[in-house]
Image (tube, helix red, strand yellow):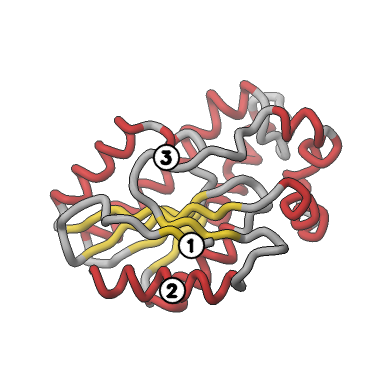
């Protein structure tokens, strides 16, 4: 399934594309495919911030692989997103469209956050586009097992608790492109992303 609605901002030219989704949804792969199709810069939150986030958690007497506790949520996560967004604004200020890959679970569900993002982007002569990568529980679990990342240990060990704490019906409050990345999806991920890229390039 692929849903495309009206652009979130009327401005043309630069694009700030958010690629979000739950852990194991395939958002990093989707982001890379989108970057390859558009030629835009891609910034992945984990790539940019993981070493610093892990060391910060250790310095706070926490677990470097923690991505679920209050400590991480209140003292580390906000800094990760701050770094990601500052890097994005620098790209846009230089005239470079940028793709941001991160869960964006809290952010895309907050109308005020999205509105602030859109206003700032318009001031730079650009627009915001959101790509939401959707998947089912079993497919995400399989991907987490396959990638074998230490940051997923808690999720996999406490899978029922983790799943109970997320809302798989979550969708961005703003207009968005929906990518179905379930294993049983009717269209391959690459094909869906290419279609999204074509639409983004036409309206840019």
> 28 left or right of 89?
right
How crowded is the residue under tag 2: few (<14 C-alpha within 10 Å), some, or many (20+)? some
Q: Which residue is mark 3?
A: 108
From the viewer's side, name the closer residue of 116 and 186. 186
Quadrant in the picture for the C terminus: bottom left
* Circle nearer the viewer, 1 or 2: 1
Q: Answer yes or no: do the residues labelled 1 and 2 have beta carbons within 8 Å?
A: yes
**Upstream in sequence: badge 1 or badge 2:** 1
Query: Which residue sits at x=35%, y=62%?
Result: 98
Q: Which residue is mark 2?
A: 195
Q: Answer yes or no: do the residues labelled 1 and 3 have beta carbons within 8 Å?
A: no
How crowded is the residue under tag 3: few (<14 C-alpha within 10 Å), some, or many (20+)? many
Q: SS at mark 3?
A: helix
Q: Whole-percent x and y of residue 19?
A: 47, 55
From the viewer's side, name the closer residue of 194 and 122. 194
Q: Which residue is mark 1?
A: 2
Cα gap from disc 1 to disc 2, whole angstroms: 9 Å
**Upstream in sequence: badge 2 or badge 3:** 3
Q: Whole-percent x and y of residue 135?
A: 64, 53
* Circle nearer the viewer, 1 or 3: 1
Res 47 quadrant in image = bottom right
**Upstream in sequence: badge 1 or badge 3:** 1
From the viewer's side, name the closer residue of 170 and 120. 170
In this rendering, the answer to whether 176 lies above or below 66 is below
């Amino acid at each position: 399934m692929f849903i495309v609605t009206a652009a979130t901002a009327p401005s043309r030219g630069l694009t700030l594309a958010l690629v979000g989704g739950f852990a194991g949804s395939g958002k990093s792969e989707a982001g890379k495919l989108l970057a390859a199709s558009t030629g835009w810069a891609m910034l992945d939150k984990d790539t940019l911030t993981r070493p610093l986030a892990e060391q910060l958690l250790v310095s706070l007497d926490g677990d470097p692989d923690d991505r679920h506790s209050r400590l991480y949520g209140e003292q580390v996560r906000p800094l990760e997103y701050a770094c990601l967004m500052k890097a994005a604004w620098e790209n846009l200020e230089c005239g470079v469209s940028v793709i941001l890959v991160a869960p964006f679970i809290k952010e895309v569900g907050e109308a005020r956050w999205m509105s602030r993002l859109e206003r700032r982007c318009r001031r730079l002569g650009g627009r915001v586009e959101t790509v939401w990568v959707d998947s089912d529980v079993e497919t995400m679990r399989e991907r987490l097992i396959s990638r074998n990342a230490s940051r997923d240990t808690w999720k996999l060990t406490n899978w029922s608790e983790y799943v109970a704490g997320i809302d798989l019906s979550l969708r961005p409050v703003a207009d968005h492109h929906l990518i179905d990345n379930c294993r049983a999806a009717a269209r391959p991920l690459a094909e869906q992303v290419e279609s999204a890229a074509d639409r983004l390039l036409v309206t840019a």
